[in-house]
Amino acid sequence: MITIDGPLGSGKGTIANALASQLGWHLLDSGALYRLVAIAALDAGLGPGDEEALAELAARLDVQFADSGDDQETKLNGARVGARLRSQEVSAMASRVAALAGVRAAIVKRQQDFRRPPGLVADGRDMGTVIFPDAPLKIYLTASVEVRAQRRYKQLKEKGESVNLSRLFRDIEERDKRDRTRRIAPLRPAADAVIIDSSELSIKEVLAKIKHLLEEKDISI
Ligand code: DC
């Protein structure tokens, strides 16, 4: 069991994906779960203030993920959600629904059920602190806001979304603040997490660091 937590744009999704595929382990993209709750909420016309209805919706959510982490295979109520999963509208709503205790409680067990042999790589904000506190290897991946905004800008551009870099920078700062200061499961490194700053590192270099940590723990890759 490996947890990778960190803010948006830290590269945790990419790293978790690569690790899971190299180890032949399962993958839990917990942010995608919150994003799917957000999509279902938007479609149902619910706002961030409708906590009870949102918690109920989260508990009932019918979702499907591919172990490959391929977004194209992610389904909500049997239908592919496609590029909408990573859109700015859904990102903003996901951050709001993720701040609600009822919504978080509704999906704790669903997340823990992803832990199956031969192993699980779970990425999110509270994987090491709340959902899998006994994970033997916990990574907290971070990077400067500037670097994260640039990465996100490139990602959205490639997907054909129209984006404004300074707005993105502000959005990221705002979302970070909300994720870090919320009362429930705030974004923070677990006491026993290894902190990796990826601002100056390539994906390959981050993976090499984690592989080294795995070797130290005798997990072969
Ligand atoms: O990692 P992401 O950007 O896909 O996450 C979407 C939102 O969900 C983000 O605002 C933080 C929230 N989230 C969370 O609160 N807890 C998690 N374990 C994962 C994501």
Image (tube, helix red, strand yellow):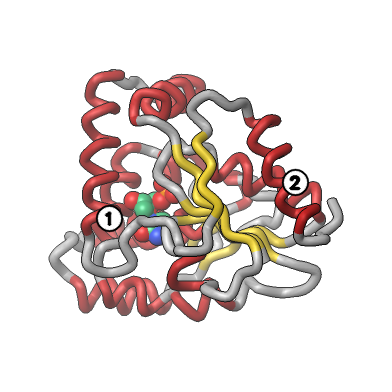
Going from the N terminus, do you reach mark 1 or mark 2 first?
1
How crowded is the residue under tag 2: few (<14 C-alpha within 10 Å), some, or many (20+)? some
SS at mark 1 in the image = helix
Q: Where is residue 59 in the image (x, y as percent from the top left)?
A: 40, 78
Question: Disc 1 residue type?
Answer: Leu
SS at mark 2 in the image = helix
Q: In which quarter of the image is the N terminus?
A: bottom right
Return the residue at label 2: 211
Residue 131 in view, yes or no: yes
Return the residue at label 1: 42
170 or 181: which is nearer to us? 181
Of the residues tagged 1 and 2, which is closer to the observer?
Answer: 2
- The residue that appears at 77% across and 55% down in the rendered structure is 216
Compared to residue 196, the image places residue 47 above or below, namely: below
45 or 193: which is nearer to us? 193
Q: Quadrant of ligand 1?
A: bottom left
Residue 79 in view, yes or no: no
Residue 122 shows which numbered tag? none
- The residue that appears at 84% across and 51% down in the rendered structure is 221
Compared to residue 57, the image places residue 187 above or below, namely: above
Compared to residue 182, the image places residue 70 above or below, namely: above
